[in-house]
Each structure stands twice: as C-alpha cells, then as structure tokens.
Image: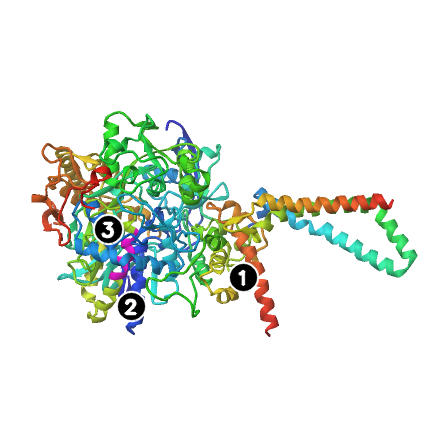
Amino acid sequence: MQKPASYRPSMSRRWWLQHQHFVLYMLREATVVPLVFFAGCMIAGLWALNSGAEAWVSWQAFMANPLVILINLLTLAASLFHAATFFPLMPRVMPIRIGAKTLPVNAIVGGMWAVVAIIAIALVAYFIWRA
Amino acid sequence: MSQTKSIRVQRYLPEQEPEPFWQNYEVPFDESTSILDALNYIKDELDNTLSYRWSCRMAICGSCGVMVNGIPKLGCKTFLREYGTRVDISALAHFPVERDLVVDMDIFMEHLEAVKPYIIDKSKGRPTGESDTYRQTPAQMARYHQFSNCINCGLCYAACPQFGLNNQFLGPAAITLAQRYNLDNRDKGKRERMAALSEHDGVWSCTFVGFCSTVCPKHVDPAAAVNQGKIEAAKYTLINLLNG
Amino acid sequence: MNRDEFDIVIVGGGGAGLRTAIAAAEKAKAEGRQQRIALISKIYPMRSHTVAAEGGAAAVTDEGDSYQAHFDDTVSGGDWLCDQGVVDYFVHNTYRELAQLERWGCPWSRRPDGSIQVRRFGGMKTARTWFAADKSGFHMLHTLFQTSMQYPEIERLDEYYVTDLAVENQQVHGLIALCVATGEMHVIGAKAVILATGGAGRLFRFNTNAGTVTGDGMAMAYRHGVALRDMEFVQYHPTGLPGSGVLITEASRGEGGILLNKDGYRYLQDYGLGPETPLGEPKNKYMELGPRDKLSQAFWQEQQAGRTGKLGDSDVVYLDLRHLGKDYILERLPFICELAKAFVNVDPIKEPIPIRPAVHYTMGGIETNGQCETSIQGLYAAGECASVGLHGANRLGSNSLSELLVFGRLAGESASDLASERSAPSKAVLEQQAQQQLDLIHQLKQGDGSENWVALRKEMVKAMESGCGIYREEAGMQAALNTIRALRQRYKNVKLEDSSESYNTDLLQCLEVGCSLDIAEASCLAALERRESRGAHQRLDEGLQKRDDVNFLKHSQVFYQGDANATITWQDVDVRFSAPAERVYGDAAKGAHS
C-alpha cells in the first residue's frame, strides 16, 4: 500500500543547542578531551621514568608549568562532572534488589560519592604524611 | 473559561501545500485544560480540518504524543497552565509527518516486532495444561515490571537524537520491550532476541543521551533498559566469540 | 479501489478482537487449515479502549469459591436478565482464559509464593478478581497484542476504518474499509466476519470512555437487520473524576476505599447496602462493594438531598483511601494516584478524591446466541459490542475483561470452522456495497448539505444525558427519543469542511456520529418501552419503580428501519437454572438467595 506524501524534518547541525539536556550531554561527551590530555601526560611520565633522570626532571618541569596545571585542574573538574552524570546511571543499569524492593537511587549514588571522598582524603593524607 | 491563550499549530496538508506552515488559534482555557483539550476545541469549534491522533485522554493509550515547544509530550497529560505566552504544537520529531500532527508509525511498529516481544519457552518443564500457570514471586516480577509499563507513545523516539540521525536504530521503546521479556523468569528466549540487540542498530547506537527517560510519561526509564541491554549484548558477543 | 480476500476478518483490535484473531490462528493451525486472517482496526491495536480498564478480570480461583457462586453473583447482579446458559458457560471458562494469558506473559499481581493474587470487587460474593496492579486492561491488551505478533497468519490492517458490511440474503460476504492514511477504499471479501468493536459510551456527554467508543460495529450490524438487544441498560460507573470523567477503578473500593458525602458520612448504609463495615475491612457485597448500579443510584439520591460537595461545576462525593497507607496504595493503585494528581490535583495518599458517576459500559449490543453468532450467517460479535446475554441489566465489575477472552476465543474458533466450510464471497455484492459507500462519502464531501456533525453530536450527548441518565422518566425519555430522531433526519444533510483524502479525521468523526445517532435511537426507544425498573434502568414514573417480571422478564430487541422509526420486540430470557428472586445486598441478603 503506497503511503501518501510525507515530509521528514531534517535535523539541523545545531540540534544539540535546542535543549539544555542536549547541551549537558555534549559537555559530558567533551570531557573526553582534557582526559585524553591527562592520559597523554601519564604515558609521557612513564616513558620519562624509564628513560632516565634527565627525562624525568624535564617531565616534572613540564607538569609544573602553570598552564599544564590549569589544564589538569580542568581535567579534574571534567572527570568530577562526568562522574556526577555517570553515578546516577549505575543504580538504574545495575539495580541492587533486596526481595521485591530496590535499593533507593540516592543511597547508591551517595555511596559512590562517599567512596570517592574516602579515596581522595586518604590520598591527600598520605601525601601530607609523606611530606 | 474567560481567559484565552494563543496556540500555534504546525499544519501539513500535502494535498494543498507542499510545505508545512504554522497556524494560530485562540483557545479558551482554565486550570484543567490539557493540550489535547485545546486541540479538540480547535477541531470542534474553529477548524474541522485539523488532524491529530487521540483516544483515551487518560495517559494510557499512547496516541496523543506531540511536540510542545520542541519537547515531546503526551497531549492529554500536559496542561496549558504550565505554559506562558508561547505554545507551539507540532508533530512528534524524527518520524515522517503524514498530515498535521499525524506521523507515520510504521518504523516504530517494525522495531517493536523485531525484538520478538512475547514469551518464548520451549523448555520441558513449562506449564502446558490449559489451567496451568507459571510461578512468579513479587521479587521476580519486580525485575522487569517497570519496563512492562511502556505505552508505546513514541515520545522517547522523538527525544532520541540517535534515532533522528538513523531511524534503523531499534530505539528506546523496542529495546525496553526486549529487556522486559529478557528479565521475565517465564521467558527462555533471550538468545533469540540478542542477535537483533547486539547489532550496530541495536543497543550500540545508543550514546546514553538519556533524554528518552526524561520525557517518558510513565517513568519506564528506557535509558536504563538500553544500557542494561549493552551489558547483555557484550556478554552475548563475548560468549559467541569464545564458542567460535 | 483496492481489493483483497481473506478467510476471516476481525473488526476491532481491542482485547476481544486480538483474542479472536489468536484463537482463529491457533484453530486453523490445529486443524491443518491454510487460512488468511485479517485484523482491522481504526486505531493501532494497543490504543484500543481495553487499555483503560483498571480493576481486573474475574474467575473462580481460590478454594472455597465455586462456579455456582460466580454464576449467582452474575445473575443477581444482572437483575435476572442474564441468559443463564451463557453465564454458566462463562463461569466455567474464565479461569482457563486467565491462565492462558498468564502463560503469554501478563504480569498478574502475585502472592509472596508466586501464585496468582485475587482482589475483592463489587457485587462479588468472594475475592475472585485477577489484577495487574490497577492497569489490568493495559497489561492484558499489550500482552495480547505482543503475543499476536508471533502469528504470521494474522495480517494487521492498522488504521483502517470499516464503513460497512457486505451482506445479501442474510449472508455476509465481507466488508468495505477506508484506509485512513490514504483515503482509499478497500473492498475486503471474507467468509467470516467478527465484530469486536467495543461499546458506545460516547453517546453520552459525561463518560469514562475513549473518544473512539462510538458504537460503529453495533451500527453496522444493526443497519443490516441484526437486532440491538438490551440497549436501555447503560452502566454508570460510580467513580469517575469530575470534569474529565476519567475512571477511578472499583478496585479502590475493593482494596478498602470508602465513599463519603460532603458531611464525611458513609451514605451507602442508607441505601440497602449496610450496615457500615469497619474502616479497612471491606466486606463483599456490603457498602462500597455493592454493585455499580446501586452505588450510582445512591449518588443521585444524595445529590437530590443536597448532601454532595462541589468541584468546579460538578456535584461530587468523596473516595477516601488514606487509611490504606502510602505503601499499600502505591503497590495496588499507582495509576489512580497518577490520574488524581494530573486531573484534579489531589494526592489520594493525603486527601479524599472527589468523584461522581460517569457512563462507563454498554450492557446491550449486537444480539448473538451463546456461540457469538448473529442472525446473519458468517457474522459474529464478541466483547462489549455484543449482547451475548451475559450481563443482563447490570454488569458486575471485572466480568467484562473475562468476557472478551472467553467469547473472543469462542468466536475465533467458530469462525475458523465456519470459514473452512463456506464458499467464496460474492464479488458482485461487495462491489455494489463499495459503490454505495463511495457515493455516500462523495456526498458528504461534495454535497450541498449545511449541517455540521459537531453540532449534531453536541445535541445528541446532551439529549442522552438528560433523558437516559441514572434515573429516567417517561417525558424525559420521550423528549430524548424525539431529539435523536430529529438529529437523524438532520444528519442526512451533513457536509464536511475537509474534502481531502489523507487522514481526514473530519470524515471519520462524521461517520462515527452517524453510527452513534442510529444506536442512540435504539437505546432511547428500548428505555422508553421498558415500563419497569431493573438494574441500571431505573424509572421515577409512578407504578414503574419496581421490577415487573410478569411483563418484562424479557430482552428488548430493536430493529433498524432505514429512515423510518426503529421498531421494538421482546424476547424471552433463559432462566433455566435460577428463578428470579429479590436482588439484595448488605445484611438484607442474609438468608436470601446467595
């Protein structure tokens, strides 16, 4: 059976600007850019460690550059933002059930933030103790 | 009903005009006037030629999905009181528009059918007598029950940019329905469904925009179902790989 | 014009239509027949109004219950106007059908051990209603629709509007349908046609029904000479939301909800349903668990006495669930909470819900025998559009979802058998009927009429509401009948604004109004001529306020006479098992027929 003429509105290139939800989604996807930079830094660090003291010192100098610190602070913010969008998904994709009841979303998300906080505090405490 | 609101409706009349156009209507309203009530008022009192789908007007049949100011909404459960001066109503996004607010749902129906949305159980122990039933505890039912509440309104497809870019993507509702049966303890048909789900146009076309769950009028959370499907699809692919 | 031929054509994609289609497909498979089955629906099947049923489906389930008890409840609930052979068949077959639906995946609510849970319902002696939270119809419809997808023999024609049957010499040859998307006429031959088109609640202004419930199938059969039976019996559901008429399920009361007037008094104890039952201890066939006709009538009495409250323009009473507690309400009645919040801005956990009666169900319909066969060979009817004789003068809640399964299956299996024996449909009859329909639609689009269907519909629903309400009077019914007859004449002069082909909903709604007007006449005429009070038909006229078994233990049958006035005859009721007795509830029922 032939359907009558229909039109299909095409999606504009700026579709993601049309709703706040899509803007946040694009922002979340964009967090990958600083993360790639940070991953590059880490790989370079490993390479430098392996290449001897001179390379290690120059890598340390590079990491101490204010611009690099700024970018890595941005990376930290980006990964926290990504976590904030990702954590609420966890209980929905992998719900924890006790009998017919599901553990509340807030409890699981709160739990994950608590783990993040504990690790962060432990690391900071470790470095202070080392220093 | 002394106040009125100006409503813009996107019309498409292919037999008269090749392009869609906007038309203004002045509609009386009070606290309880829904978008669907407004459309019915226009149809009855102002313009008999306006076409749109509706049926139950109590948010369970899934007929009256439209875009209101660019957001997918169920017309009967969205009220004029929620809006200011701008109320633009158009057909559900990402589907071909056939006339006014009526979209072509064929591709949606094909996707539903593609996931084999019914109990598949060829096991020896299945109940076969005409008065026999399965046992299913409340805990077993809780695993899939939320996903069984989908009313097939299609709002999630209108909210999904991936479906907008590629309508071969099975989409949120169809994948949710597959997951509804996969999680049902009466069903043994998961393997039969996973082939369609594991393809590129299955779960992997989803990039977790998540807007589908935001617009869902029945809190079905299709985004959760799709991402559960990704875990299942990954397992399925891996097992197939190991089995050669 | 497009032409096709099937063995079996089912009109209507709701619960009854889908069950019929699956039964026909299974029967054909079991008998080794190659049969083409078409399922035609004016909307996508999962949009059908079965979707809005909330409470559940009845079947004798628990130990301690019996077929006899379900039979007695149904027959006395129907004020002895039920055909008892049909009721007997029904009560014996409901469990099997609900179990079948379970095996197809319906998420029926369960007990902790995984067995089926049942709930109380009005007019039922014991708890026997299967339910899926408060979306039983929704889950049943989607289960049936999804299950139907595994039968390739079922060919769906979604969004096709059937305009007429092709009938000659009391034999059906198929039907004529309009493809909504294209506006093209389809001439569809068939050896068996099953009408499963639902009720006619939209004859009334204030109702719980979807916009599609316009009685099209009833009108189609009626226009070809099949009697519409018991059309005077229209069920008012006691709990609709004021303003919209949206349904608040009887299960709210089955779970323990109570009805209060504006003074906070449980008024049902004053209407033969008492004594008052303790809060949170609902008792079958007492108080709020009385039958729907009695509860709606009690509302009317309270309204006359000035003891109802107000919400907007509506007189209301209140449904109080608060004592059930949040968790229980959210488990058993989540949809009710959603609806009350959306449509009257009330949270049932915190406040009583304002409600009032609304037209809900058409007890009467296309006359069939116990096998779902109409007087036209090859034509069947099942579900709400049919009058198989199950509901009598008042349907019990949760009997209709069971009905559409039991009789849908029966119709589908019988149709498969019949289609294997009947010869091919006559092309000449089909072509002739199709030409008539084309001419009619051309007339609507291009003729020089001056009437608009919207105005006719408004006058119809107003007339029906004022003349054929919860209580009826001679003068009011006569006035309604006169109005409807005048509207039928005016309908001949109707003209459309929209002459286009694709998705012409102006045309579809106009055709629906034409159907509604024809059956509205049948409904008014039968109401006027039934000079007694029985079940949902209650008269205020002097001397007619009681049941009159001497003269009216009979089904009404209304026959279409074209442009002339419809005529009425009377048919005996099958009372082979249970002699008519007084219909009583509450303590008054103690020691009476039970």
Query: Viewer-nearest of labels 2 and 3?
Result: 3
N-terminal of the pair, mark 2 or mark 3, is 2
Q: Are marks 2 and 3 in contact (CB under 8 Å)?
A: no
Q: Position of residue C139 (x, y in %)?
A: 39, 52
Viewer-nearest residue: B76 or B15: B76
Confirm whether circles 2 and 3 share one chain.
yes
Query: How far apart are labels 2 and 1 at the CA level?
Result: 37 Å
Q: Is residue C491 left or right of residue B153?
A: left
Q: Is residue A70 left or right of residue C594?
A: right
Task: Say if residue A10 shows up in the picture.
Answer: no
| Residue at image mark 3 | C69
Q: Position of residue C564 (x, y in %)?
A: 11, 46
Q: Position of residue C377 (x, y in %)?
A: 17, 62
Could you tell me what secondary structure mostly forms the magenta stretch?
helix
Colour mode of the rendering: rainbow
Viewer-nearest residue: C351 or C277: C277
Give yes or no for residue C122 being in the magenta stretch. Answer: no
Viewer-nearest residue: C377 or C22: C22
Above or below C447: residue B31: above
Give the residue type that dot 3 points to.
Answer: Ala
Query: How far apart are labels 1 and 3 at the CA level?
Result: 54 Å
Pointer 3 indicates a residue of which chain?
Answer: C
Pointer 2 indicates a residue of which chain?
Answer: C
Q: Which residues are magenta?
A: C401-410
The quarter of the displayed image where residue C116 is located: bottom left
Give the residue type that dot 1 points to.
Answer: Asp
Confirm whether circles 1 and 3 share one chain.
no
Give yes or no for residue C403 being in the magenta stretch. Answer: yes
- Dot 3, crowdedness within 10 Å: few (<14), some or many (≥20)? some
| Residue at image mark 2 | C27
